[in-house]
Amino acid sequence: MKIKHILTIVILALTSRTLYAQNARFVTQGVIEYEKKVNMLALITERIKKSKDDTWGQKILEDYKKNKPQFKILKSSLTFLNGKTLFTPVAEEVMENSWFDFEQAKQNNVLYTNTLNGTSTVQKKIFEETYLVKDSTRKINWKLTDEIRNIAGYDCRRANAVIMDSIYVVAFYTDEIPVSGGPESFTGLPGMILGLALPKEHITWFATSVSDQPVTEAQLKEPTKGKPTDNKKLSIILKDALKDWGDYALDILRAVSI
């Protein structure tokens, strides 16, 4: 009787999984709205620790705590169709006046990705210059986990990775959107990334909504403005321009390369 009971449970489980797979609707086109959250207080605290003038730094920190929110919120959208995506930042309504100007707290990239052939075109604004970076997509060695989190109505599985030798990345993706895309330059998972965190950089991106709607090729226009280059050449240009910036140069290079 016990064996029959176990077999019955197994059969029911397999049947329910099959029915779910048959009835599941996979989204292949639409628009995702993301919210980028930057912990400004953490970034300012780290910057002050690097400063030699602790008195000045503490005054600035206390003033920020009293008058500014801990997090800066930025919005963006990702349009996708047939394995192609276009990540577009939403312009800030009000420019925030601050003693600190962090590249991490900006969204200057318009990014077109073809996830099928692993290529991307990025219109990247760095200071007063705009570059058009055409290259292959970043190769990320993702490690899948069993953790599940619901984001914007989709059950998402967690994956971990390290990029640029030292930046730890946590991503949550859903295979109900079978497009290997995500915010900014993050791709390579078996589904769309709806949640992303860079803990040591104090940055997160999370989808606030997913619109399952028809999309046309005209809505996925590849960027065309900027000085043509690739990632390797851009890195050389920036390192040369920032060679006298000391430790701050490393922070800027890391921020604009994410």
Image (spheres, rainbow, N blue to C red):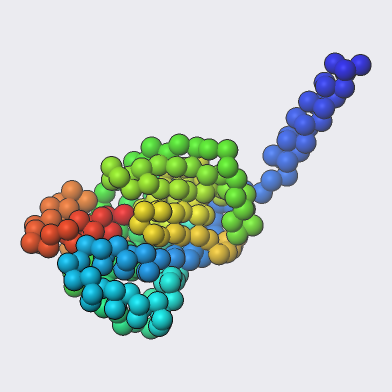
Please, is residue 92 above or below residue 126 in the view? below
Q: What is the quadrant of the N terminus in the image?
A: top right
Taking the spot 46% from the left edge, 60% from the top edge, the residue there is 205
- Is residue 139 visible in the rendered image? The answer is yes
Quadrant position of residue 12 = top right
Residue drawn at x 62%, y 53% as measured from the top left? 150
* Residue 191 in the image, given as x and y percentages of width and height: 52, 45
Relative placement, left or right, of 212 versus 38 is right
Q: Position of residue 112 (x, y in %)?
A: 36, 57
Name which quarter of the figure residue 228 lies in.
bottom left
Please state the horizontal and vertical placement of residue 215, each as a whole percent of the image.
52, 62
Depth order, front residue of 188/238: 238
Of all residues, the one furthest to the front in this rendering is 55
* Residue 175 showing in the rendered view: no
Image location (x, y in percent) of residue 172:
52, 49
Instruction: State the quadrant of the C terminus.
Output: bottom left
Left or right, 52 with respect to 78, comes to left
**Residue 202 vs residue 156, the one in the foreground:** 202
Residue drawn at 48 percent across, 66 percent down: 35
In the figure, residue 85 lies in which quadrant? Answer: bottom left
Q: Nearer the viewer, residue 23 or 89?
A: 89
Residue 148 in the image: above or below residue 217: above
